[in-house]
Image: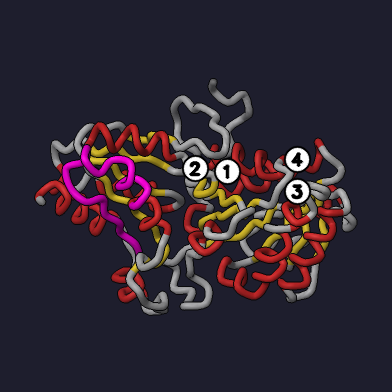
Amino acid sequence: MPSATARPRKYIHAVRETLAEEMEADADVVVIGIDVAAGSVYGATKGLAERFGPERVMDTPIAEAGVVGAAVGAAMAGLRPVVEVMYMDFISVCLDPIVNQAAKLRYMTGGGVRIPLVIRTQTGGGRSSGAQHSQSLEGMLAHVPGLKVFLPSDPRDVADLLRAAIRDDGPVVFVENRRLYNSPTPDGPWETLPPGRARIVAPGDDVTVIAWGRMVGDALAACQDERLAGVGVEVIDLRTLVPLDLETLLASVRRTGRALVVHEAVEGFGPGAEIAMRLTEELLYEIEGPIRRLGALQAPIPYSPPLEEAVLPGPASIAGAVRALLDD
C-alpha cells in the first residue's frame, strides 16, 4: 500500500521530521547525544530542543560510552531513547554498552526487560573526513545477535524505517549516510515496507545487484554506463541488514542467475561475503557462476580526495564488476 504520510523534502528533513512526529506521539521518546540541542553536527535534530524542551532533548558530554550506557538504562526504565553517535567510527568507543548490554539484556533476563533503544549514527566516505570519520561498520554490528541494523537509502525509507525503529521494543542501530543528507525525495509511487523487506528499485533479468545506503544510487548510476548498454540489471535496495530479506534476494538471483553484492564497507570479512554465501548455499546448482562482492579496499579511508575515490566503490567500478560477471 502507498504510504499515507507526506513526503519529506530531503533525507535530512526525513530524519528531523520523523523524530518530531514520534516525540509528539509518545512522551517516552527522548533524544540524547552530543550537541543534539543545537541541532547536531549536520542539523538532524535542529529545532527539537525548542519544541520539546531540555528534559526530552538532552545534550551530553563528549563521552559516547557513558551516553549509550545511560540510554540503555533509560530504555530499561521505560523510556524510548534515540541516542545519536555523531560518527559511526565512534561506535567503537561504546561497544560494551551496545554489544554486551543492549543486545543481550532482554535474552539474559528471559524477556523480563525491554530495550527500546535507537542508536542513530552516520557513516560513509567521500568527503575527505579522514580514516577516523569515514568508516562503514555495519557488518560488525550485524554480527552481534540481538541488534537490528537499518540502512535507508531514500528519504521516504528514512521516515518509514526510523518510525519502525523507534517503536521497536529492541535495540536498533539506524545508519544514515551523510552524503545522502541533501538528496531529495524522488517522484513516483511509493510502497511502505516493514523492516526485513528489501525493495526492487530497478527490475532486470540478466544480473542482480544488491546494495544499501549510498551504494543503491551508485548502482543505479552504474546501469547507465555504456558497458552495460542493453543489460537488464535488477537493483535491490536491502534497506535492513538485520533482519535480512533473503527471500526477495533468492527469487531475484534464481531468475537472473548472476549476482553482485555492493557495499561501502571494506570488502574483506564484510557483509557482502555473508550474503553471497547464503545465496550460494541455496542456489549453487541454479546460478550461472559465482556470486561476487564489491566493497572498499582493505585500507584505512584516505584523506586525499583522489585516493579516497580509488578506495571506495562507485558507479564505474560497479559497472566494471557487473560487466566482468557477464563476461565470465
- The crowd level at tag 3 (other Cα within 10 Å; few <14, some 14-19, many 20+) is many
The answer to whether residue 53 is left or right of residue 131 is right
Q: Is residue 287 above or below residue 271?
A: above
Q: Nearer the viewer, mark 1 or mark 3?
A: 3
Percent coordinates x, y for residue 168 in the rendering: 70, 42
Using the numbered discs, state the Cα–Cα distance from disc 4 to disc 2 in whole angstroms: 19 Å
Tell whether position 268 is magenta. no
The answer to whether residue 100 is left or right of residue 255 is right
Residue tagged by mark 4? Answer: 22
Residue 6 location, quadrant: top right
Using the numbered discs, state the Cα–Cα distance from disc 1 to disc 3 in whole angstroms: 18 Å
Label located before the other in sequence (1 or 4): 4
Q: Residue at x 52, y 73 (%)?
A: 133
Query: Which is nearer the eye, 12 or 171?
Result: 171
Q: Which mark is residue 116?
A: 3
Percent coordinates x, y for residue 67 in the rendering: 77, 68
- The crowd level at tag 2 (other Cα within 10 Å; few <14, some 14-19, many 20+) is many
Residue tagged by mark 1? Answer: 158
Q: Are marks 2 and 3 in contact (CB under 8 Å)?
A: no
Query: Which is nearer the eye, 3 or 211?
Result: 211
The answer to whether residue 53 is left or right of residue 4 is right
Q: Secondary structure at mark 2?
A: loop
Label located before the other in sequence (2 or 3): 3
Q: Residue at x 26, y 48 (%)?
A: 222
Q: Which residues are magenta?
A: 277-295
Query: Which is nearer the eye, 192 or 188?
Result: 192
Q: Secondary structure at mark 1?
A: helix
Give the amino acid at mark 3: Pro
Label located before the other in sequence (3 or 4): 4
